[in-house]
Image (cartoon, coloured by chain):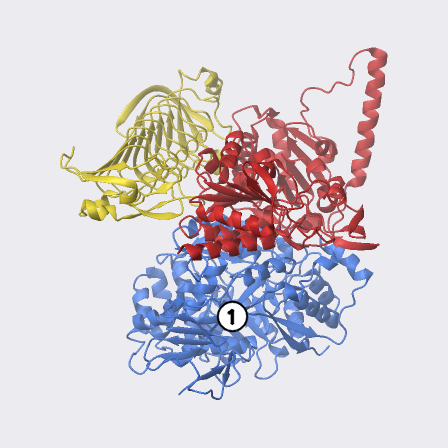
Amino acid sequence: MTVVTGVTCPVCGTFCDDIELVVKDNVITDVRNACAMGAAKFLNYSTHRNLRPLVRKNGELVEASIDEAVKRAAEILVDATYPILYGWSNTSCEAIRVGVELTEEVGGVIDNTSTVCHGPSVLSIQDVGIASCTLGQLRHRADLIFYWASNPWSAHPRHIERYTMFSEGRFQKSAWRGYLSRLGGIMSRKRLRRAANLVLRRDVFATPEVERRLPYSMFQKKRKMVVVDVRNTRTAEAADYFLQVEPNKDYELLQAFRMLIRDEELDVSEVAGVPVEILEEVADVMVGCELGILFFGVGLTMSEGKLRNVDAALNLTRDLNSHTKFLIMPMRGHFNVTGADVVFAWQTGYPYAIDFSHGYPRYNPGETSVIDILCRDEADASLIIASDPVAHFPQKAAQNLVKKPLIAIDPEVTPTTLMADVVFPSAFVGIEAHGTAYRMDHVPLPLKKIVEPPKTCLPDTEILQRILHKVRKLRREQN
Amino acid sequence: MITLYPKRLFKVPVEAECICPDVFAEKSAKEIATLQIWEGNRKRTLGDLFKIKHETDSPTEEFTIRICGDVSKVRKIGAKMSMGNIIVEGDADMHLGEEMKGGIITVTGNADSWTGSMMKNGTIEIKGNAGDYIGASYRGSTQGMSGGKIIIHGNAGYEVGCFMRKGLIKVHGDIGRFAGIHMRDGTIFIQGNSEGRAGAQMINGKIVVCGYIPSILPTFTIDDIRPKVKVNEENVEGPFYRFVGDLADGGDGKLFVSKTKNPHLSSYEEYL
Amino acid sequence: MDIAIKDGKIVEKVDEKKAEVVDASRMIVMPGGVDIHCHIAGAEVNSGRILRPEDHFKDVEAKTALTRSGVGYSIPSTFTTGYRYSRMGYTTVMNPSMPPLEARHTHEELDDTPMVDKATYPLLGDWWFVLEHLRDGLLEECAAHVAWMMSATKGYAIKIVNPGGLEAWGFGRNVKNLDDPVRYFNITPREILRGLCRVNKLLNMPHTIHVHTNNLGQPGNYLTTLETMKCVEDLAEEGHPAIHITHCQFSAFKGSDWGTMSSGAEEIAKYVNHHSHVTLDMGQVIFTDTTTMTADGPFQYGLYQLSGNKWVNHDVETETSAGIVPFRYKRKSAVHATQWSIALELALLIKDPWKIYMTTDHPNGGPFTAYPHIIAWLMSGVARKKTMSKISKRARRKSLLPSIARELGFYEIAIVTRAGQAKALGLKQKGHLGVGADADVAVYDINPELVDPSKKYKTARRAFKRAAYTIKGGEIVVKDGQIVRPVFGKTFWVDVKTSLPIEVNDDIKRKFREYWTVEYENYPIPDRFLHVPAPIPVKAEV
C-alpha cells in the first residue's frame, strides 16, 4: 500500500492539487481531501470502459487492433475536405499540442469545449480585456466576493474553501465563523417558523416580497460574499447577500451598476426586478471594498445576451478600478479547458474555433466554431476527443455529426463512442497518464500517473501521434 | 459582363475572394477560370467550380459580375472590391462585400452574417434577409463599417452595426437584439420592430426604430419628443421619443423610438 | 578568412575535403544574433495573443513541408516567432518576464519556439520571500531561496520590475520613488534593489540583476533611473556591471507632465559614460500598432487610462503582476515621436557600444521584426533624418538627434546586436566566432567594403532582414531568408550550487501552503520537462 500526495484532481476547473490517494496493487482504494466529484472519479473511473479499439464494419462496431484503427482514422481524415477535431478540455496539454499539429496537417477545424461554455467570454475579452489574477491573490486579499450566475457549492465544491470566503489569507481572514452563526440563525428561524405555522395555522414569518435594505453584515469591514443568480442556490444560502435577478436580465443589471458607479441617475425605479435603492447600496459596497472579485459562470455566457453580458461584467469591473481594486474571473468547468485555450493560442494565436483549411490559422467564432459548422452541415468528417458532443450538442448539430465518418478517442463509453466509426479507448489522464493542465486562473500544474492503464489503452498523446504519423505517410503516398 | 454558374451544389465552405470586379477586370474568361479559390481544404480554380461566360449585354456601363445559381456556401464574394457591380441571383454566404471600398453588390435572395463587415464605401443591397454582424468589425477590433450603405429589404439578425463608425444601415423589416452595439457613429434605420437592447454601449451615432421595441436599456435617458427625424436626406415622420446613451459608457448616441408604436414607454414622459 | 565548424562548435580547422563549404565571400559574417530582452513566451504573452485576434489575422504564415503555420505581427505564435528570428540571423533570445508560479507555461511555449536557444528570467523583485528576508536582513537566506527559485523555475537571471510597486498593486496602489516603503512589508524599492544586487553577486549569477525601473513610462522618471543606477554603485566591482537597466527609453523621460515631456537621454548617457557598473538596452519605439505587456501592473493600468484601449491585468499571488494594453505609436504624436528619439539618442550618446544593446522590448516598443529598421537608423544619419522629417514638429524641435553625427559601423552593430548582449548575459560561448564558441553564425548578403551603410541604408536594412545563411549549432537552418531546416533550440538555466541549499521540511511546506495555492511538490519544474535543457552550473559564495 502506498500513499501518493499532491495529486491534482482531473475533474473541475478548481483543479485542486492537494489530493492524497491510497494505492494498493495498482488500484486506488482511498481518496483524501477530494470533494465528492473528485473522490467519485478516482474511485470509480474504470467501471465503464472499452478495452480495445473498435472499428465499424457493416454497421457494427467490432474490436480491432490499434494499427487497424489508426489506419482507418487516418484514412478518414486524409479523405476529408473539411474535418472538425473537437473536445480537448479533458485531456493534457501535451495531447492538445499534438492535436493542433494533426489539425494543421489535415487542414481541419480545431475547437474545444469553450465553444459551448466560456467562448462568449473570450469574445468579450477580445473587445474589452480582463482584469484578473491567480486565485491565491484573492485568498490573501479579497474582501468582497461576487459569484454571478454560478453555483460553486455544487459545481466547484472546494472553490469557496480553497480560494475565497472560507480560505485563510495574509490580509483577509476566513469568514467561516460568520457563516456558521448565520447558518445557526437561518436554522432557528426555520424551526420557529415551522412551529408558528403549526400553532397559528398561518405563515407569520413570510418575508416581505423585496427587502429594501441590505443586511447589516454587508456594511461590516470584513470578508463578504454576494451571489447574483436567477434562483436560490446552496451558494446563495451561504452568502451575505443574495441578489435575485430576473431571468435574462443580467445585462441590464450589470449596465445599471456601471451607471451608478459613474454617479449617474437612473430613469427607472427598478432594474431586472431589483429596486434601484438596493442597487445603489450594492454599488456603494463595491466601490468601498479593498479588493473585489466577480466570478461569473455559464449562467451569464449562455443566457440571453451571451457575450454582451460578459462584456458588461468586464466593463463593470474595469470601471471599478478607478475607485478600488476589482478583478473578474470566469468559472471554467473542465479541469483543462483553460489549457486547451492556452495551447491553441500559443500555437495559432487564437484560443478556440480555429480553421486550418487554408493552411494557416483563421478564427471567427460563429463561422469557424464547430456547433455552427455542424448546424450548417459543412463538416465531412470528425475526430472527437475527451468529450461527448452526441449527448451535449444541439440536436441538429449532433445529427449532422453522426451522419459523417466519426472518430472518437475517449476512455469511457459515451453516446459519442457508441455512434462512432472508429473508437480508441484511451488511458485516463491524471490517473493513468501524466501531463500538464491549467487551472481556471491559468496556473499550470502537473497531472500525475498514479496507476498503470490496461495495456490496450494508450494515452491520448500517443494515439494522436500515431494517427498523425499515419496521416503523413498516407499523404506522402498520395503525392 | 461576366456570368458565373456554379457547376454543382457545394457542401463544404467555398472561399472566393477573387469574385471581385477589380480582379476580373481586364482578364479574359480563360484567365478568370484559372483564379484560385478554396473548397474546404482543397485548392481549386474558379473554372473547376463555375462555368464562366462572357456576355456582352451588360445592364450598365460599369463592369458587372453576375452569379446565377446557388452560392449559399460561397464566402467573401466581392470582398475588398472598389468598383463595378456584382449581382447575385439567389443567396450569398458570409462576408459578402467585406472591406469593400466601392461599387454595388445586389443580392436577390438572402445574405448571411458579416455582410459588409469593415466596409469603407459602396453599396450593398439585399432583397431578402441578412444574418448577424452586418457592417461589423473583425473580432477584437473596433474598426466596424466606416462608410457606404447597406440596405436590407427583409429582416436582419443580431449585433447589426457592431463598432460601426460611419455610413448607413437600413433595414426594412425587423432587427435582432443589440443593434448598434458599441457603435461609434453612423446611422442604423429600422423600419420594422427591434428585439431590444438597441444602442447598447453606443458612444455616438443614431439609431431609428419605427416599429415596436420591448424596452429601453436602463442606461439610456429620455431627452425629447421629436415630430420627425432626418435619416441622411430623408425625413421620417414620427413622433419619436429621443433617448440619449449609453450612459454606462459615457456615450452620447441618439436612439429614436416611434411614440405611437410604443405606448408602454409613455412612463418615460414624466422625466421630460 | 575561414571559419571551421565541427559538432556544433567553432574549431581551429576541419578537413576541407570532407566539409560542406558555405561561400560567404563579399558578405558579412557575424555571430548569431542575441536578444537580451524580448517577450516571446509565457502567460502574459499568450494572454496578449488571446486578446488580439485583430493583430494576427492579416499577417499569417502557411504551413510548408518543413515549417508549422502560425500568425505574426506584434505577438506572433511560437513557431512563427522562432522562424522570424532565425530568418534575421538571430540564434539566441531571452524571455525576460516569467511569473515563477506560471513558469511551466513559459517553458512549454519556449519548447514550441524553434530555431533559437533561449532562457527566461523569473520575476523576483516583489516575491514575498525576498521582501521578508531582505526586510529582516537575512541576505544569505534570501540568496538560498533565490537559488532554489532558479532551479525550480528553470530561470536564468533575477528580473526586477517596478520593485515594491507590484506588491502595492495587489491593492491597486504603487510606490512613488526608491524610498517609498511598501505597505505591510516595511521595505523600500532601494532596499529591494540593493538586496537582490548583493544576492546576485553572492550567487555568482552569469547576468546582473535585470531591472525595469520604478515610475516607468512617466514624465520625469529619468531621475528615478539615475537614482536606480546610483543606488548599486558601491556594490559593483571595478569594471564589472552590477545592474542592467532594461528598455531604458521608457525610463528616460524628462518633464513634469505629458505636455512638457522631453528627453532625459543626455543625463542618462552622461552617467553611463562615467560609470562602468551599468548596462542598458534601448527599448526602441517603432511607429506601428503593437501590444504593450509588462509585469508592471500599475503602469499598464495607467496606459489603459491614457489610451482607452482594452486592458488585461493578471496579478500573481505572492509574486508579481502583469498587464497588457494594445498601443499604436503615432509619428504625429509629440510624446511617441520623442520616445522614438530618446532610444536612438541613448544608443548614440553612450559612447561604448558594449554598454547599450539594441532591443524594442518586443513587443512593447514594436515587434522584433523591425530590428533592421533600427540598424538603419543607427548606421545612417540620412535614415534618421528621413524619419525625422515625418514626425511631430514639436518632437522634432526638441530632439537631440539632429545634433548627433555619430553613425555606427558594422563592428559596432555586431556588438549592440550580439557580442555585447552575450557578454552582459555571461553567455561565454555566444556572441563571438572564436574557437570554442557555439557554431551560431549569421551571414548577411552585403559587402562592407563596397556598401556605405550611411548612404545606402536601405541596402543594409534589406540585408539584415533576410540572412543569406543562418547557422545554428553547426547546421544551416536558413538560406536566403528561408527556413531550410527546422531545429529545436536549447533552454539555458542557471543551476546554482549553494553550500546550504534550503531544506525542504514540513515548515517550508506549510509556509508554501500559506503563501501559494499549490502544493510544494507541484511547484518546481523537473529538468526532463524541458525539451532540450541546458543547465549552467554555477558555484555560489553562500
Tally of numbered tags: 1
> Is residue B57 visible in this depiction of the protein?
yes
Q: Nearer the viewer, residue A408 or C14?
A: A408
User: Does dot 1 land on a helix, a strand or a loop?
Assistant: loop
Q: Chain of mark 1?
A: C
Q: Residues within 10 Å of mark 1 (few under 14, many from 20)?
A: many
| Residue B76 against residue A348 in the figure, above or below | above
Disc 1 marks a residue whose amino acid type is: Ile
Q: Colour of chain B?
A: yellow
Residue indicated by mark 1 = C36
Q: Nearer the viewer, residue B162 or C435?
A: C435
Residue C290 sits in quarter: bottom left
Residue at 48% of width from left, 23% of height from top? B215
Q: Nearer the viewer, residue A84 or B111?
A: A84
Judging from the image, what is the letter of the chain drawn in red? A
As drawn, the residue found furthest toward the front would be: A58
Residue A257 sits in quarter: top right
Judging from the image, what is the letter of the chain drawn in blue? C
